[in-house]
Image: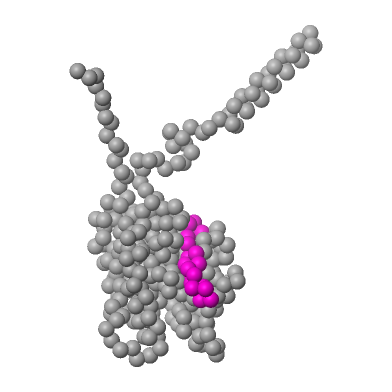
């Protein structure tokens, strides 16, 4: 009798182990969406690429405000220079309203101090404590949305994309306007403004796996006048380089938003609300294209093949 009872227990265990193995090694059924897989007919993954512009980058906050108000999703972000700061803020979970409030308090001495250095007139070292207090995080992994930050290695001329590890040094590097700020040393590289590599980081955003790209380019007409100081000389140098590669990022963007920033200076930190409004106006003009962007692609029509007559 004991032997019979042991056989029953042994058979039950074998049956249980067999069922467990069958469950563990079977392919998941993705047809009902239970694995949180985006369906082919669902909305595409949308990314937002933000260009540079020093203080003018505050206009990006206005663009984000309109996207949020109209429920245009942003699944991932990329940024260069000032655009990287706004992108990181949004990726950290800050709302456009919170970023606008923080921007109203920013002045030159919030993030920079003058220095004596052969490679620059100032350092943006103070940016580190400012950004840590704004974002409440210090690594890419702590962000709530994927983010790519682009800086330029001044030693090699390469565009360097950061999307993991430490967050603050790449942001500082991407904002290190050459000639003004000293380069930022990080991971064996000497980083300066990402805008040297390109005005809008669309390629870096595509690398995060998005299907649709919204690119924001802060439009200024810097050419056509004689520069009168070192900053205008550098600014026009950027403008000339930007004009040469304009088509490269545009042809890989699905929607381009271009706030009109001609009336704003590079250091107009006291005109925050005006610049945010410029971003809002430009984004609202593009709402029809933005709404069309997130519409799911229609299912292919079924083809009925009847019997041949």
User: Is residue 270 rendered to the left or right of residue 111?
Assistant: left
Whether 184 is among the magenta residues is no
Q: Is 16 or 254 nearer to us in this picture?
A: 254
Colour logic: one colour
Q: Position of residue 308 (x, y in %)?
A: 22, 19
Instruction: Inspect the magenta stretch and tell me whether residue 144 lies in it.
Output: yes
Left or right: 109 with respect to 294?
A: right
**Do we see residue 49 in this rendering?**
yes
Occupied quadrant, residue 15: top right
Counting from the top left corner in percent of width and height, residue 56 is at 36, 75
Q: Position of residue 150 (x, y in %)?
A: 47, 67
Split into 4 quadrants, where in the image is the C terminus? top left
Residue depicted at 46% across the width and 41% down the height: 36
Above or below residue 177? Residue 139 is: above
The answer to whether residue 81 shows anywhere in this view is no
Q: State the image quarter where residue 4 is shown.
A: top right
The vertical placement of 82 against 236, above or below, is above
The extreme front residue here reads: 309
Outermost top residue: 1
User: Is residue 2 shown above or below 24?
Assistant: above
Q: Which residue sits at x=53%, y=85%?
A: 119
Say which residue appears at 34% left-offset and 78% top-offset: 240
Query: What's the residue at 79%, 8% (across, down)?
Result: 1
* Outermost residue, left side: 309
7, above or below 68, in the image: above
- Left or right of residue 143: residue 42: left
The image shows residue 239 at horizontal and vertical percentages of: 34, 77
Query: How many numbered discs sit on the rendered protein?
Result: 0
Residue extent of the magenta highlight: 143-161
Outermost residue toward the right?
2
């Amino acid at each position: 009798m004991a032997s019979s009872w042991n056989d029953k227990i042994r058979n039950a265990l074998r049956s249980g182990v067999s069922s467990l193995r069958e469950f563990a090694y079977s392919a998941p059924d993705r047809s009902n969406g239970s694995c949180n897989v985006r369906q082919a007919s669902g909305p595409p993954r949308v990314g937002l690429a933000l260009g540079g512009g020093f203080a003018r980058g505050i206009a990006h906050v206005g663009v984000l405000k309109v996207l949020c108000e109209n429920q245009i999703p942003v699944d991932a972000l990329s940024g260069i220079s000032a655009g990287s700061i706004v992108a990181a803020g949004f990726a950290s979970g800050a709302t456009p309203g919170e970023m606008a409030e923080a921007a109203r308090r920013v002045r030159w001495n919030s993030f920079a101090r003058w220095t004596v250095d052969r490679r620059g007139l100032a350092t943006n070292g103070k940016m580190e404590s400012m950004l840590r207090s704004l974002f409440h995080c210090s690594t890419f992994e702590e962000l709530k949305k994927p983010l790519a930050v682009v800086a330029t290695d001044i030693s090699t001329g390469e565009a360097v994309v950061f999307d993991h590890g430490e967050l603050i040094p790449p942001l500082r590097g991407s904002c290190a306007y050459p000639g003004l700020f000293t380069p930022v040393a990080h991971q064996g590289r000497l980083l300066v403004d990402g805008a040297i590599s390109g005005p809008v980081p669309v390629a870096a955003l595509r690398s995060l796996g998005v299907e649709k790209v919204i690119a924001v380019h802060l439009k200024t007409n810097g050419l056509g006048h004689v520069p009168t100081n070192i900053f205008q000389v550098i600014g026009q140098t950027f403008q000339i380089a930007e004009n040469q590669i304009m088509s490269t990022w545009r042809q890989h963007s699905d929607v381009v938003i271009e706030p009109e920033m001609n009336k704003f200076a590079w250091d107009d930190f006291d005109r925050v609300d005006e610049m945010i409004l410029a971003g809002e106006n430009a984004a609202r003009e593009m709402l029809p294209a933005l709404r069309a962007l997130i519409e799911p692609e229609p299912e292919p029509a079924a083809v009925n093949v009847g019997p041949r007559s």
